[in-house]
């Protein structure tokens, strides 16, 4: 569970890891703060050529001090968070970049100037700020206190949230009310239903919220679309980003799935990375979020990206490929509410608001902005039985698509494919893989895949709106081939049948990706190929993660089991138990978990007087323009061959035979005792 209390470490006068800070010895803390404020220099006015990835939070009676350092321990930054008004946020970032000795001096001065009120005490070591959240009275700061490696690409590391901590802004002397407040405790416990250790990921240097094509292409094809729809903590970090005009202190969390494996075929090794990004725009649980909202945002909207590149003796490869597909709820106004615990299959209710399908039209317009055309729809709901409850959705969905197509030009037509996958599974003579594969091959021929040959030197030119433009230098052989369009799959829940169909599409795509990279001669990848089974394991793991997040149970894998020849009595019993687990979760915990998600995303806010949860009048996601933009342009860094750019921070790490320039946690080290191998310094012992 989340650590809500102060650890015993917080009372010890320990300070910085052995690579930290800066200030002159003859400056006392108050004089120096005044001097900085008089300078009027904003830290974001200059573009830092580094990023911060390790932090230590300290406290005095009046303030928090957060110290951040870069991966090499050469650059140290200081930020102060006021605690005098716990219901308000007060940030101040010191404009100076310090050296270790200078930062030590600054902390010593702060400690000495606050000795009468307890001095400076360490609160936590961490790896970035998740954000700030307020329930009834006081704000809390959410910190990543332990991270796990989830893979890397060209030296850019991906991390998962392993542990996190929620710390009240108010001082311990004011905590008595907080701990005795029933309303406050209610919302603290409620938020824990959204466990940030459950498949939340981030990277300091690679924009995980964007697909590879967006990060590498020489044209911003997604210029007009929502660039932060996959950033789950956008709302929680908004106050600090707006105040400091910087993202140095925060991490951008995506929710979903990230897994990287190294595979081999024909003596050639390659890396395969599977990334699933859940949209936060109409996010929630199974029965609480169905269909779409009035802005055309679909429930359970997930972007799946499959990235492949060859492993060439540990060196940076010269080509990389990716393919993207989408899954989401049927884009209509419909709902499904359990009437009783014993009703395992609630009725499907279509809303009269569908009308002229304006919201459905908006949904496909959004898809076009994100991915281009064509849009191939693969509808997997049951259609063989005309009276089946799913058939009414299929019929209405077909009507909506036909209505929208009438107003579209011929080159922008939607393609609607339908397959009753459940009926195929019930037919012992049918082959599920072949049935889906025909559609997958046809869709892939229309959209293609993204592939990019990396130029040997890449430059960037910053424009006035902080967007970045690809500028190829003398290497005229560098080229990118873009994926144009998207395959959008759905079943009733967009979980189990959809997951299988997406695996088949991924298998077909993997064959083309390996052929593009020159690893295989054939574009075809047979289902009995060992690589197909490796890929199947990845998609099963992804399906379990997404199903757990949306429906409260692992995914059903009966089709996968049938392909492996494992669909027997024991497997059928396991599938039955998953259904029971899913039903119990939907009946008893979904409403509370939905409230936790709404609070985290900023859709709802507890009232300070009544403590009741109420919707926000100005929803963050109805046109907020800030996004994850930071005015960073790294002119002097040594760049690796990959071209990574987005509205997020740009960071280039040199990658060579010795590996990328980043630090990883040493085995056996205690993250709370030391900062990944750097000892803490106890100033109080020598004072």
Image: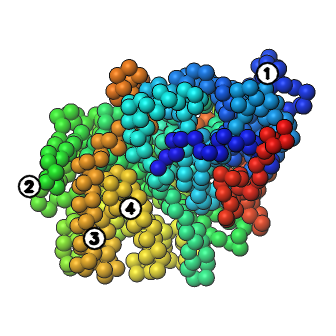
Nearer the camera: disc 1 or disc 3: 1
Sequence-first disc among 1 and 4: 1
Q: Residue 92 or 50: which is nearer the viewer?
A: 92
Judging by the rendered image, the residue that carries numbered circle 4 is 544
Q: Residue 565 or 310: which is nearer the viewer?
A: 565
Residue 533 percent across, percent down from the top left: 43, 76
The secondary structure type at the circle numbered 3 is helix
Kindly indicate the quadrant of the structure image that contains residue 107: top right
Nearer the camera: disc 2 or disc 4: 4
- Figure disc tally: 4
Q: Residue 104 or 437: which is nearer the viewer?
A: 104
Sequence-first disc among 4 and 3: 4
CA–CA distance in space, label 1 to label 4: 54 Å
Residue 80 percent across, percent down from the top left: 69, 29
Q: Estimate how packed mark 2 is, as few (under 14), some (14 to 19) or many (20 or more) residues with alpha carbons within 10 Å.
A: few
The reply to whether residue 540 is visible in this rendering is yes
Query: Which quarter of the figure is the C terminus placed in?
Result: top right
Judging by the rendered image, the residue that carries numbered circle 2 is 387
Sequence-first disc among 2 and 1: 1
Nearer the camera: disc 1 or disc 4: 1
Look at 35% across and 57% down and name the residue there: 547
Q: Residue 60 or 281: which is nearer the viewer?
A: 60
Sequence-first disc among 3 and 2: 2
Judging by the rendered image, the residue that carries numbered circle 1 is 30
In the rendered structure, the answer to whether residue 475 lies left or right of residue 508 reads right
CA–CA distance in space, label 3 to label 2: 29 Å
In the rendered structure, the answer to whether residue 203 lies left or right of residue 558 reads right
Sequence-first disc among 2 and 4: 2
């Amino acid at each position: 569970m989340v650590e809500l209390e102060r650890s015993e470490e917080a009372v010890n006068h320990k300070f910085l890891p052995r690579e930290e800070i800066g200030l002159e010895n003859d400056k006392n803390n108050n004089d120096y703060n005044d001097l900085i404020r008089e300078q009027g220099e904003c830290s974001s006015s200059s573009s830092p050529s580094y990023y911060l990835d390790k932090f230590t939070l300290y406290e005095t009676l009046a303030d928090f001090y957060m110290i951040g350092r870069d991966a090499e321990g050469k650059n140290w930054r200081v930020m102060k968070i006021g605690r005098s008004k716990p219901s308000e946020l007060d940030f101040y970032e010191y404009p100076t970049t310090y050296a270790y000795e200078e930062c030590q001096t600054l902390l010593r001065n702060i400690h000495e100037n606050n000795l009468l009120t307890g001095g400076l005490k360490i609160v936590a070591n961490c790896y970035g700020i998740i954000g700030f959240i307020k329930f009834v009275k006081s704000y809390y700061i959410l910190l990543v206190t332990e991270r796990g490696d989830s893979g890397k690409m060209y030296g850019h590391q991906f991390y998962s949230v392993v542990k996190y901590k929620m710390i009240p802004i108010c001082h311990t002397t004011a905590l008595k009310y907080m701990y005795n407040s029933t309303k406050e405790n209610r919302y603290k416990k409620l938020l824990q239903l959204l466990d940030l250790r459950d498949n939340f990921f981030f990277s300091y240097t690679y924009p995980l919220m964007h697909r590879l094509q967006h990060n590498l292409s020489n044209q911003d094809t997604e210029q007009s679309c929502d660039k932060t729809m996959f950033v789950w903590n956008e709302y929680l970090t908004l106050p600090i980003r707006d105040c400091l005009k910087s993202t140095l202190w925060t991490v951008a969390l995506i929710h979903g799935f990230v897994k990287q494996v190294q595979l081999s075929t024909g003596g050639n090794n390659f890396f395969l990375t599977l990334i699933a990004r859940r949209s936060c725009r109409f996010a929630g649980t199974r029965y609480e979020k169905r269909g779409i909202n009035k802005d055309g945002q679909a429930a359970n909207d997930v972007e799946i990206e499959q990235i492949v590149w060859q492993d060439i003796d540990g060196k940076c490869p010269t080509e990389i490929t990716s393919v993207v597909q989408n899954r989401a709820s049927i884009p209509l106004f419909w709902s499904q509410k359990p009437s009783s615990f014993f009703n395992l299959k609630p009725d499907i209710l279509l809303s009269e608001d569908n009308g002229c399908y304006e919201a459905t039209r908006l949904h496909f317009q959004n898809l076009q902005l994100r991915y281009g055309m064509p849009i191939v729809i693969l509808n997997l709901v049951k259609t063989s039985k005309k009276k089946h409850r799913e058939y009414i959705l299929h019929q209405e969905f077909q009507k909506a698509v036909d209505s929208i197509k009438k107003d579209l030009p011929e080159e922008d037509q939607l393609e609607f494919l339908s397959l009753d996958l459940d009926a195929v599974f019930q037919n012992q003579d049918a082959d599920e893989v072949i049935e889906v594969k025909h559609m997958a091959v046809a869709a892939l021929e229309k959209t293609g895949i993204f592939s990019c040959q990396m130029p040997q030197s890449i430059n960037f030119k910053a424009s006035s709106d902080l967007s970045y433009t690809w500028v190829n230098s003398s290497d005229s052989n560098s080229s990118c081939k873009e994926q144009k369009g998207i395959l959008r799959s759905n079943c009733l829940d967009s979980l189990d049948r959809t997951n299988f169909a997406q695996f088949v599409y991924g298998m077909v795509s993997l064959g083309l990706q390996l052929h593009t990279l020159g690893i295989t001669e054939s574009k075809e990848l047979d289902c009995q190929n060992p690589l197909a089974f490796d890929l199947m394991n990845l998609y099963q793991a992804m399906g379990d993660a997404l199903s757990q997040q949306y429906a409260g149970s692992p995914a059903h894998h009966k089709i996968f089991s049938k392909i492996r020849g494992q669909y027997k009595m024991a497997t059928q019993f396991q599938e039955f138990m998953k259904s029971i687990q899913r039903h119990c979760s939907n009946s008893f915990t979904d409403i509370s978990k939905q409230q936790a998600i709404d609070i985290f995303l900023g859709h709802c806010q507890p009232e300070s007087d009544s403590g009741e949860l109420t919707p926000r009048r100005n929803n963050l996601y109805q046109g907020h323009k800030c996004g994850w933009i930071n005015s960073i342009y790294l002119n002097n860094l040594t760049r690796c061959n990959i071209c990574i750019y987005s509205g997020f921070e740009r960071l280039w790490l040199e990658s060579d035979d010795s590996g990328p320039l980043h630090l990883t946690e040493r085995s056996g080290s205690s993250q709370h005792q030391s900062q990944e191998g750097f000892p803490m310094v106890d100033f109080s012992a020598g004072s």
